[in-house]
Every structure is written in structure tokens, then in C-alpha cells.
Amino acid sequence: SNHNTTMLLKRGFRLLKIASVVLTAQLCMSLAPAITKSLHSKHISSRQISTCNRWQPLKSAATDEVTSHAEEKDDATSSKVDHIPGSRGDGYIVTKTYDVPIEGFPSLSDVFEPSDQERLQLEVMNVTLPAALMMLDPEKYPTQSRARKAIRQRAICICRNSDSQFDELGKVIARAYPGDIIGYQQRGGSDYYSVQGTPYRLPAFDVPVIFEDDHVAIVNKPAGIVAYRAEGNRGGGSRGGHGRDTLISALPAVLKPSNIPITDENYPMKRPQPVHRLDRPTSGLVVVAKTKLATVYLSQQFEFRKAQKTYMAILNGSPQQPSCDNETTEDGWHLIDHDLEDKSAVTKWKVLQTVKSLHGNNGVLTLVELKPKTGRYHQLRRHMAWVCKAPIVGDATYDEDNMRLRKRGLFLCSNEITIEHPYYNTPSGREEWSQLKKDTLNLGEGCLLEEDEESGIVSLRVRIDLPKKFASFLMHEDARANKFLNETE
């Protein structure tokens, strides 16, 4: 009897499920006409619904806030129209707009020759998109090649109706008509020239800016940060690499855009570009170029060893001075001329301080000043470890035996650098420098612009204090060693 009761209950539950499914289907069929009638009353088709779902979220509150902030910061950044249509999407933000005049372009003949007008089929009320950009912003787009380049980089979009959004991506063959709004768009938070207020993904580390102008900047790279992303990787993630935790990714968030006039020969870089690099565990000064000519000029200085770099390091032990590889001068400087990978490698070094240490080689640590004359791979670290037999404290690669001194990282810092200024040594820059009427210009703590009396070259010299861990580490090791020696006596 219990078995029969169980079977009856199972059949009852099945009938209830079937009934619920049937009732749900009947309810949907009864409501379908009402839903269809409602949609038709609003004249919205299924295709229009998908279009609304695609574009409506693009004009977010963040975008409105950025646009309004840009208008308050600089009226020149926005157009003459009061209403700026929403952004295109895909993470882009329109940062600058141009209003095509209602009367067209009456000055067309002042910009283009008759032969060009005929070839490009240019009319007062109907011009190509590159031609419109040249006439609306001649400073930014002085030539057709410059305008076409911006279009091909997906930086130009068009709004055909002032009440709608920028739903048309600019093309070189596109035409511009009176009443159109042309927009300059940038990927929000990832471009060097995004308007102030555009949300960057700020770096998780601090990058102090020691010196900056429109042409060059010098920043203080923290230890543990790589200068560039891993090769072939732009975002890190599952493919490895360093993602955004790199110096080059942090520079757009800490440096200001260059405001130099744009010419065919010189223009601001899309991103500020470091012209040399430091090892990941090394901290200190890195030179960054902000314009095309500065990139070339500064890169040549490092390639031909014109840039003068100074490092500070704490060595594990007392550095040796083998006569075959080391020369000593009267002022205490030693010269190492020891090839690395069959390439010339030259380093000058000088002892500044020696302290006692319980864990250092031979019971001492040595603070030295280093001046590399060449730039070989790990040159300073290998010269100190292989030639002087005193590796840099914290060097896990060339000081494998001593594990006790690795807790606070590598004690190597680039604390001073001198370069030839990339602008003040050009003809136009010389005129501006002469207007300063000074042979030396003090730009604040640690920064100095000065002109050499003999050569007339204007140099930029920057110096920073050593990280606090240098002084505290030396004092702590010396105090512990002295305390231990006093107790044993």
C-alpha cells in the first residue's frame, strides 16, 4: 500500500508541472497583442531597439563630467556650439569639436589652388574631410597629410545632426557640409593628450617629476618598477608581462602635454618617451622626451655617450684595485676598463664612506660613487662584482652567497644626470635662451640650466637626494657591528 501511495504522489506532481507550463504559455499568448500594440504606438522597431541599447549607455555621467570640465578649463577646447553630442563609444571620448559654418568655406580659394580644387572637387558648400580640418584648425592640420593621418588613426568622427551623437567615423573620402560637427576623439584615460579631467588609471606607485618643460622631463623612477612593458605585450595578463605597472604607462598620468607649435619637423609625441632605461631594481633619474626632435636629440646623446650619469651604490665589502684593470687618479677616482661580451666597458668609481657590518664581506660595507662611460648590460653591477670583488648590496644576480643583505632591495641609485637641452641648443631655442639674459638659470632644488662659456652649449643638470634607506642601512649596520664588538671586548 505504501508503494501505491508513492506512485500516486509522483503522478500528481507531474500533472501539476504540466498544468503550470500550459498556464504560462496561455498567459504569454494573451499578453503578446498588448505588447505589440504598445511598441507600434511608439514607432520603435526591433532594429531601433538594438540601436538604442548600443549607443545610449555611451553618454555616461563620467563623459558629461569630463566634457563640462574641459569647457570650463579651456574654451578653445570646445566648439562654438552650445551642445556637444555624445561620444562615439568603444571607450572613446570626444575632447574637441569643430562647427562647419552655415555659409560654408568662402575662403576656399585662399587655401587651395584652382588645380587642387578641381582635383579634389572642392566647393564652398561641399569639401572633403581633410580639407575641412585644414581650414577649421590650420595650426593642428597645416597639410593634407597631417589631416589624413589623424583620420586614419580613427581620431576624427562626424555628427550630421547636432541633436544626435557622433555616429559616423571619419574617412579620408568623407565630405563635410554646412551644419556638420567634426569631433576629435581620444580613448578615455589612455592617451597622453586627453583633456584634463579625463579619468586615467593612475599608477599604483609614485613617480616624482624632478624637472619638466615642453620638450623634456626628468622623473625619479622607484625601485622595483620596469621602464617598458615586456616585448610583444601591451596589457599583461595571461600572456605575462608587466601590464600597466611600468614607468612608460605611468608617465601620461604625471606629465603635462607639450604645447609647442606643430610643424612637419617637430610635434608632440603621442606618449612621453623615455630615451634610456634603468634596471628594475635600480631607482633614480630617467630622461623623458616629449617632442619628436627631443626624442632624436636626446637618444643621440645617450648613444654617443654625451650624457653624463652618476650613480651611488653600497658595496658588500671593500672594493679591490687590481692594477691590470684599474687606474687611480690623484683625486681618488679609479678607472675600470674591462670588456663585457667583447665590447668596451669603462667605469669610474670613488670611495665615499666605509662602515662596519656583521654580515658584510670582511666585516665592512662601502658607499661608492660610480660614473659609467659606456652603457653595457648590467655594467656597474658586473664591474663591482667581477673586477672589484665587492658586489652591490642586494644584488641577487651577482651576489648569490650573501642572503642576509637582500631584505631591502638593491642599493643602486642614479642620483645625478647632465644632458644638453634638446631645445635651447637649436636656432629658435638660442633666441629664447638669449632673452633670459642669464648664463645660469636655477630652476629649483637640484635643477640647473647653465651655458658653457667656451662651447656655448646649454646643459641641464639634475641631482636628487639618495633614498632614505641608504643612510638608515649604513647607520644600522655600523651601530650593530660596534655594539657587538664592544660586548665581545
Image (cartoon, rainbow, N blue to C red):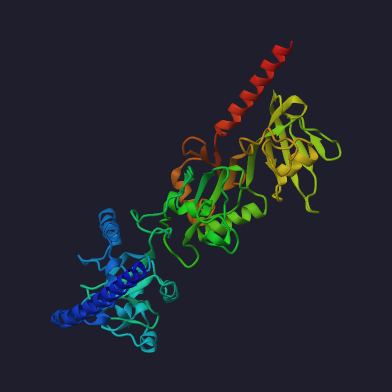
Q: Position of residue 292 (x, y in %)?
A: 51, 61
51 lies left or right of 395: left
Q: Position of residue 103 (x, y in %)?
A: 21, 78
Residue found at x 56% / y 43%:
285
Q: Position of residue 105 (x, y in %)?
A: 27, 78
Report the front residue among 92 and 275: 92
- In the rendered image, the residue lying farthest to the front is 1
Q: Does 282 sit above or below residue 288? A: above
For the N terminus, the image quarter is: bottom left
Residue found at x 26% / y 77%:
21
**The quadrant where residue 165 appears:** bottom left
Report the front residue among 325 and 405: 405
**The quadrant where residue 179 appears:** bottom left
Q: Position of residue 142 (x, y in %)?
A: 40, 70
Residue 427, visible in the rendered structure? yes
206 lies left or right of 122: right
Residue found at x 45% / y 65%:
263
243 lies left or right of 475: left
| Count of marks, rendered view | 0
For the C terminus, the image quarter is: top right
Report the front residue among 482 and 164: 482
- In the rendered image, the residue lying farthest to the right is 324
Report the front residue among 144 and 355: 355
Residue found at x 53% / y 51%:
247
Residue 160, visible in the rendered structure? no
